Amino acid sequence: MTDLTFPSAVASSSAAPWTPAESALSPAEASSPEVTWHLRVAYDGAAYAGWQVQSTVKTVQGELLTRLRRLLRCPELKIYGCSRTDAGVHALDQQVSFTAPTSADFTPESLVAKLNRWLPDDIVVLSAAVREPGFNARAHNTGKAYTYCISPGRKVNPLWARFVWRTPRPLDVDAMRAAAVHLVGEHDFASFAANSRQEVETTVRTVYRLELLEDSGLIFMNAVGESFLYKMVRALAGYLVHVGSGRAAPEDAVRVLEAKDRCQAAESAPAAGLFLAKVFWKPEEWKTYQPLIPPFAL
């Protein structure tokens, strides 16, 4: 596992990978009457009802959107995040795109500085870049990596407590790794999804990597895939802890997958331990990805 280093802002189109040298423009170079912006954002999700805007509760997207509309004087502005993180889930590298009129006179540096002055302390904009028209953070990424943090049967450092799942007893990490092997690849993950079959076109997904790493007395589950079902990563974490606690054999994962029944898998892990860790823009970039240690554990 590597130290926490945020990746450079990059982008991707359906035709070819986008890189900073190829796609980052200055606002003055944008020939359109509108400018497409790409932000990288980190947040502590504990105080929020998730990423996506909701009318009656505080969300990360809502906080960011309110500031952007005011700053850019664009009341109809819409923004798109690459991951709709759930209530209480954190992000080390959420990626956001939006299109604004060129009359909004900001450089990437000044936009970041102004936003960070206006945003609450638990949300920070890491960087901004101007992209070619049509760039969409949600549509153009090629995959995501999530990290789930577990404290196995031990007293948690109080500075970490809000970011980990403390299990009541030690866990058999080797058993968890053996179970994870059965969950890698293309499968119908209906047993690990909060979605009903009526809410999604298909519950088939491809998990590229599912790894259990140990560091600083914690266990980190790293899940890498093109896309995940609603609450799927938390369901995977909950099931692997179920196996690590000795309540199921590693090979039982095969039966759970084949059942296509959410009731056959264990209870989902709490939201607090989950981080959106990395977004991929290039095909097969996930193969060389080195999982990050969340900053509290450094």
Image (cartoon, rainbow, N blue to C red):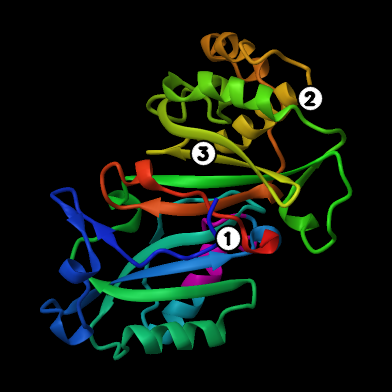
Q: How many labels does the image show?
A: 3
Does the rendering let one see residue 234?
yes
Residue at 64 percent of width and 16 percent of height: 250
Q: Nearer the viewer, residue 102 or 249?
A: 249
Q: Give the range drawn in magenta.
A: 50-65
Q: In which quarter of the image is residue 7?
A: bottom left
Circle 1 residue: 55
Whether the magenta-drawn stretch holds residue 195 is answered as no
The C terminus appears in which quarter of the rendering?
Answer: bottom right
Taken as a whole, is the magenta stretch helix, strand or loop?
A: loop
Relative image position of residue 59 (x, y in whole percent): 59, 62
| Cα–Cα span, label 2 and label 3 | 20 Å
Amino acid type shown at disc 3: Ala
The residue depicted at 73 percent of the width and 46 percent of the height is: 218
Q: Which three-letter amino acid code belongs to the residue tagged 2?
A: Ser
Relative to the observer, which residue lies in front, 247 or 139? 247
Q: For mark 2, does the 10 Å Cα neighbourhood hold few (<14), some (14 to 19), or many (20 or more) residues?
A: many
- The front one of 259 and 200 is 259
Marks 1, 3: nearer the viewer: 3
Find disc 3 in the rendering and name its residue: 223
Pointer 1 or 3: first along the chain: 1
Vertically, is 186 above or below 194?
above
- Relative to 118, 242 lies left or right: right
Q: What element carries label 2?
A: loop
The residue that disc 2 covers is 245
Q: Residue 123 placed where, x, y %?
A: 58, 71
Q: Distance between the residues labelled 2 and 1?
A: 40 Å
Q: Looking at the image, can residue 132 be seen?
A: no
Q: Residues within 10 Å of mark 1 (few under 14, many from 20)?
A: few
**Circle 1 sits in a helix, a strand or a loop, which is it?**
loop
Q: Earlier in the sequence, mark 2 or mark 3?
A: 3
Q: Is residue 244 above or below residue 214?
A: above
